[in-house]
Amino acid sequence: MAKISIIKDREKIIDIVRAFFKVRGFVEVETPLLVSAPDPSPYNEVFETSKVRGKRAFLTPSPEFFMKRLLAQGANNIFQICKAFRNPQELNPFHNPEFTILEWYRVNATYTDLMVDCENLVSHIFKSLSKQIKSEKLKNSMSYLGKKIDITLPWPRISVKEAFNKYANVDLDEFMDLKTAKRIAQNKSYKVEKETTWEQLYHQIFLNEIEPNFPKDKPLILFDYPAPLAALSQIKKTDPRYAERFEFYIGGVELGNGYSELTDSKEQKKRLIGDLKERKKLCMKTFPYDRKFVEALKSIPKTAGIAVGIDRLIMLFTNSATIQEVLPFPANDIFTP
Amino acid sequence: MATTNDLKKGMCITFKDEPHLIIEKTFVSPGKGSAFCRTKLKNLRTKYVLDFTFKSGEKIEETPLHTAEFQYLYQQGNEFVFMNPRTYEQINLTEEMLGNFKHFLKEGDSYQIYMLEGEPITFRAPQKVRLKVTEAENATKGNTVTSTTKPVKVETGYELQAPLFVKTGDVIVINTETGEYVERA
């Protein structure tokens, strides 16, 4: 449970974030938390509530679909700080089922513009919080859990392909083929079975050999994800095996996930149906896909958007090791055994 | 055969042909329907600790451990000597194996120890212990104003904070994980 001092820091950080976007001409919007067709991406279960006007209703796992509908209606650059709900298999230091998300969208922009936004945002929060610190030396060095992190701009960037090569000695171009991926994983003595999927092999190597070895003394931008992990991002025109998606890490903690947004409504419909099929296979809740969202993509401008975990950002700036320490009432205090 | 769904802290598995103790376990779901189980494993032969992330549902081989009852004899340097009361066999446990429980060992008392092929693996620490208070100051009128607890010493020599009403000769219950007072027995 968060101490009062952290609750005050929380307010301060959220005020700084809000001002950062408003000064840059972004309009703050509010979209529904109670929805009829949530994002079906199958990695977390959604919360279903009682029915509204006879229709099934859910707590939204992300404000993305409605924000994109606003973009299609002609909203320019927009941002939102709101609650999102995802039911994790268990509570851990980085996940609470109800959390605060920051999303922003830039029109006529790509994911590289968002990378610069992320750098500027973190650097701006740091400077605003440490105005009282005069020493030049401290200027770009923050401390998190006893470790120094140099947040000087620009941050190091590495593509997923480079990271696989550097940390796991795997050629990701070759690894893209399931048979080859199985052979490579087997040689690394991971368990490979008939039903093992490509995503499982990719993530097992990523989680065991790559992510833990990322340098923690500087932030890191990891970009160009393999196309099967495109989520809602656009496939690269120059190389269709990869997608314009990135995540950024500070002190080893993943803070945000951004895309050059997919604006092709046909492709979007295909991916939503694919996700729903995957959910059915995994015995998760299924529901109709959001037709109004798909329809809206027909008139959406070229855009780039990103979601950042506000609670994790607050962890970083309040030197807190767990998400529970930055929430006034974390779920493990509310839902006691 | 067990799967990652059965993994528990304190369980012993065969990993890369070696017995490993699970020290930590968390779920991770990085995306696209695949869930993973992140663990910290300790090789019981080399004592080397490593991180490994299993695919959720992956088959794992559990190494059967059995518990044996041992009597605590005495401390010898950084080690604690126990004896099997049936065979008189003696084993030494390290401070690390006992963790916080080293403060609560009572000479002559029996404890459960996990064994693998005749070797002690971990100590099965009870969550609570009852110990007799050997030293407790009388609560004077002076300290009641500033504090509601006072230091007391129990029969194992361990010192902790207890409510003012606790007196020498009382038996108190202590949480062995936190080392804190729970109640008067």
Image (cartoon, helix red, strand yellow):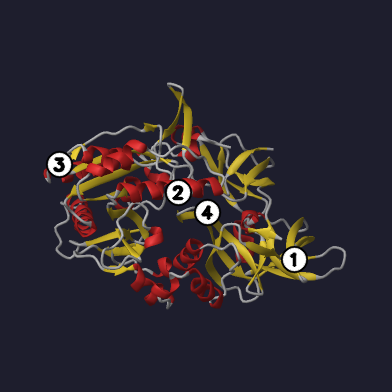
Q: Which residue is mark 2?
A: A275
Q: Position of residue A204 (x, y in %)?
A: 50, 65
Q: Which mark is residue B115?
A: 1
Chain holding disc 4: B
Q: Using the image, determine if residue A88 lies above or below residue A225.
A: above
Q: Amino acid at mark 3?
A: Lys
Q: Which mark is residue B27?
A: 4
Q: Amino acid at mark 4?
A: Phe
Instruction: Tell me the element at label 2.
Output: helix
Q: Amino acid at mark 1?
A: Met
Give the label, 2 or 4, closer to the camera. 2
Which residue is found at the position 65% from the left and 62% from the top?
B59
Residues marked 4 and 1 touching at CB (< 8 Å): no
Looking at the rendered image, the quarter that the C terminus of chain A falls into is: top right
Q: Position of residue A233 (x, y in %)?
A: 31, 54
Instruction: Tell me the element at label 1.
Output: strand
Chain holding disc 1: B
Q: Using the image, determine if residue A107 lies above or below residue A81.
A: below
Q: CA distance from mark 2 to mark 4?
A: 21 Å
Q: CA distance from mark 3 to mark 1?
A: 63 Å
Q: CA distance from mark 4 to mark 3?
A: 37 Å
Q: CA distance from mark 4 to mark 1?
A: 28 Å
Of the pair A238 and A43, the residue shown nearer to us: A238
Label 3 crowd (10 A; few <14 / some 14-19 / many >=20): some
Label 4 crowd (10 A; few <14 / some 14-19 / many >=20): many
Chain holding disc 2: A
Give the label, 4 or 1, closer to the camera. 4
Labels 3 and 1 positioned on one and the same chain:
no
Q: Using the image, determine if residue B67 lies above or below residue A296.
A: below
Q: Which mark is residue A22?
A: 3
Instruction: Tell me the element at label 3.
Output: helix
